[in-house]
Image: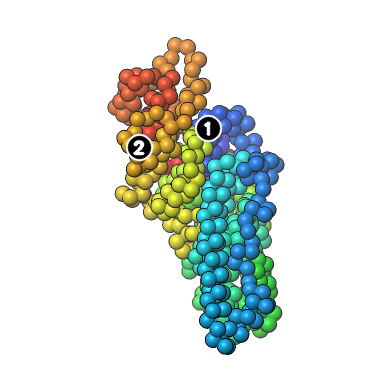
Amino acid sequence: MASGLSKLSPREFDYWKAQHLLQRAGFGGTPAQVLALKNLGLEDAVDSLLEFQEIEENGVTARTEGRFDDSIMRMRTPEERRQQNQARRTGNEAVLERFRNERQMRQRADRQQLAEMQQWWLGRMIESPRPLQEKMTLFLHGHFATGYRPVEDSFHMFMQNEMFRSNAVGNFKNDLARNIIRDPAMIKYLNNNQNSRQAPNENLARELMELFTLGEGRGYGEQDIKEGARALTGYTYVEDSFQFNRQRHDNGYKVIFGQRGNWDGDDFVDLIFTRPSASQFICEKLYKFFVNDTPGAAARDGRTTIRQMSQLLRKENWELKPVLRKLFMSRHFYDDANRSSIIKSPIQLVVQSVRSLRTPVRSLSRLVETCNFMGQGLFVPPSVKGWDGGRKWINTSTLFIRQNTLVYLLTGREPSSNPWDAAGGGFDARHLVDHLRDLPGRDRDLDAVSYLSRFTIGSVPEEERLALWVDYVRQRGGATDNETLVNLLALMTAAPEYQLC
């Protein structure tokens, strides 16, 4: 296997490597989009994904300001607090009940807004002309995992999501780590709003090192956590804005990583990024997300690549874009051993299927619900560790849902509906094989099955399965018949290989 970040020869960047790039650095694309990427050539293809700021957003993704209500979970006004305090003193249950009912009403409205946000983000991933920006936003959401339930403020989750999107390929230290210790959603999620010099709370300091920057037990000790918590005292928020509360901040000297100083949160971040494990840990996470998440692959085949990525990250002063550019141009990234080596997350499965096959979306609310059932709810990761991913995505229950989801996208048929008659449900699959139409002297049915199998499951199957699929096409209506193609795609997407990308 090719290792390290040595560049792929531009001559080797063919159609299938372009598809691999589009799947990993985005969510896949149609045959026409893959061909357009291939025709750009390796360097321009990678830059077309990385330099997404130059791409104008479309109507679905352009407007974010004012999209969601920032006042649902607002703080009580001074007058409301006065009335509530007076009611508690006098035992006025009617007034207290009114405040409780209002709170419950706001919580219900906020949960509804979160559901709308889940649909908005899923739709954005499907429609965005900037796929890498959304893919990195998803990566960062799983890396700096923050769950809605402890936060109980959907607008704060939206603010965090927008922060990730704005800094998707920016500076990991200055744009992401510094912002995350100022992020209202993360501050609430890890209780740093309760972190004061009188009662230090270690949650944010611990997870900042353990899960976000250094890795569990790598380059820090319990004393560093305690002193880091002191550095983060007073880092809180008011309404929708970060606030540094000097009265709650511990202004005494702290010793972190053996360095003594009157450190605050920014100093703490600076000290963290002097540790050798920081660049290594971040690049390991990027490698598993973009290259290969097979157990042991990063430590075995990816060791040299990760080491060179981490060296480059430090050299580039923690800028992510140069590292990703080098990775996406590397021979290692396109090595056969790294193709079809990542199990699609539920979001990847749904978004890639719609973007590459160009099926109807059907219902965003239904797709969000399906992703929840498959174990990946947007804005509700299971813990601060995020999603385990990999083989944890697949079990007997989720595999059944995955297959039904593709049938639903292809045909519109739901599991509880009548037996499937494969009418197509408004989906025209013929665009997937239109480019094979005018090839003289070719077996079009064989060509269509061979192409679609490689396009969907990553390879042409063994001779026996290929022959069965070709016979099926010939007996039904041929590769020009839409119903036949939809049926064939249902068979292919039910194959175990379709769960990989």
The x and y percentages for residue 112 are 53, 57
Considering only order in the chain, which callout, 1 or 2, is on the residue closer to the N terminus? 1
Closer to us: 70 or 8: 70
The quarter of the picture where the C terminus appears is top left
Q: Quadrant of residue 311?
A: bottom right
Residue bearing the label numbered 1: 30
Residue bearing the label numbered 2: 495
Closer to us: 226 or 125: 125
The x and y percentages for residue 61 are 63, 45
Give the farthest residue toward the front: 94
The x and y percentages for residue 201 are 55, 78
From the viewer's perspective, is residue 346 above or below residue 181? above
Task: Tell me what residue is drawn at x 33 percent, y 50 percent.
Answer: 397
Tell me if I can see residue 463 in this picture: no
Give the farthest residue toward the top: 441
Residue 364 relative to residue 247: left or right = left
Q: Secondary structure at mark 1?
A: loop
Which three-letter amino acid code belongs to the residue tagged 1? Answer: Thr
Task: Tell me what residue is drawn at x 42 percent, y 46 percent.
Answer: 343
Q: Secondary structure at mark 2?
A: loop
- How many neighbours does mark 2 have within 10 angstroms: few (below 14), some (14-19), or many (20 or more)? some
